[in-house]
Amino acid sequence: MKSLSYMLAWRFLWFKGKDKNISFMIKTCFLSIFIGTFALMVTLIIMNGFEKVIHEKMQGINADLIITAPGNRLDYDNIRKTMKHHFSPLIGQMSGSTLKQIILDNHHHAIVFIKGVDVDREEDVTTIAQKIITPSHLQRTKNTILRNLLTKNHILIGHKTAQEQNLAVGDTLKILIPEPGSKKKIFLRKKEVIVGGIFKVGLDEYDSNIAIASLEFVNQLFNEQGVDVITLKLATQPDPFHYTIPGLKQLASRSWWTSLKEKFRWRINLLFAAPAPQRTKEILRHNFPHLEIHSWQELYPDLVSSLILEKYVMFFILALITLVATLNMISLLFMQIQHKLRDIAILKTMGMAHANIRSIFLALGMTLTLLASITGLAAAALVGYILEKYPFIQLPDVYYVSHLPAKMDIPIFLAVFFATLLLGFIATIIPARRTKYINIAQVLRQE
């Protein structure tokens, strides 16, 4: 009896009779669900792209974890040796830096921060070396860019600072260094530096307000030792879904099956465990209570929360479009029920149960919703692939990215797919349940 219900639903869906209104309503309902699903999915792909790109950019510049001790300098060498000795499985690379204020004494006076970095290790932790745009002919091998550029009194400046101060690589620049004085006076000491390179991060706080030099040079300028900040790059976590095809000898080995069981158990635990940065942060905080340890997200809480909020708000707002689209299903099914009153009455007279009649219209509505949502998601996937592969839409400088980003994730597709099916089911079940109130005798008498 179920197969009969599905067969009738399929015939009703492809109705080609004289009543063109129902055929037009079917096409309209399909198109509206298709457009709603497509618009919702494309918007989420773009919003997810913004979130991923900005996260990668901010994480690359700021490292995974940042260690500070407000008001105190950090003993970089001892802390580094201790952490590498006791927590080497968790920590991949470490670097130290210090941040001070200076005044650029050029055409226009400007207050900027000068950041002293460990030129031998900074490239292992952050991506600042990859953001250098001038000179462009550098041999970009690992751990050599900063070491070659930041020699003696050479510094790196942001491209906006270079534009404002009319500076180029090789130019000599005077900086003013504040020194302790009386309560009412500040003494400034002059020092000449050379512009060794220009970087472009894409964030105004870096491109306009930061200069980079070697840690040794900055400590020499301010007569200090140690660092203000230690940055950590966490050890790479194995992919839980990575799997290698075994050979015949491995399959015949009992030890291989035992190790496979342990690996499988470990991967399941990894999937449901807290993220690696969070776990490592809590472990380090417990063992170093006198230090402040933060993730890069905690440095930009407003930015991170706003990106998440925008994505969820856009999802719910655009889901209303899909909701309005599925409401057309109610009108379509009521028209179908009204048009098929005689057929329904005959089927009931022949003994078909109400549940089977309801299944006819439920299958009709869900089939239409399923086809429209799959088509809409497929079209959105095509657009997302084009935007992800060929980012040709440029954005103004007010954004953190230069081109319209796109990032497709399977969970987003599944969320949109099941949300559309749920809305379609709600819009379908309402008219389908009304079939039990049809008066068979009255319908047959009128016919």
Image (cartoon, rainbow, N blue to C red):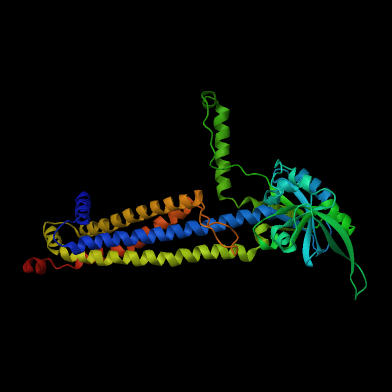
Q: Residue furthest bottom?
A: 184
Residue 112, percent across and down? 77, 64
As rendered, which of 39 and 401 lies closer to the eye? 401
Residue 218, percent across and down? 84, 56
**Quadrant housing residue 403:** bottom right
Residue for point 74% across, 45% down: 145
Please say if 329 is above or below 376.
below
Along the horizontal axis of the image, is 159 left or right of 111? left
Along the horizontal axis of the image, is 265 left or right of 2? right
Q: How many marks?
A: 0
Along the horizontal axis of the image, is 208 left or right of 386? right
Residue 126 visible here: no
Residue 325, percent across and down? 34, 65
Q: Quadrant of the C terminus?
A: bottom left
Residue 189, percent across and down? 90, 63
**Quadrant housing residue 330:** bottom left
Residue 276 visible here: yes
Q: Residue furthest right?
A: 182
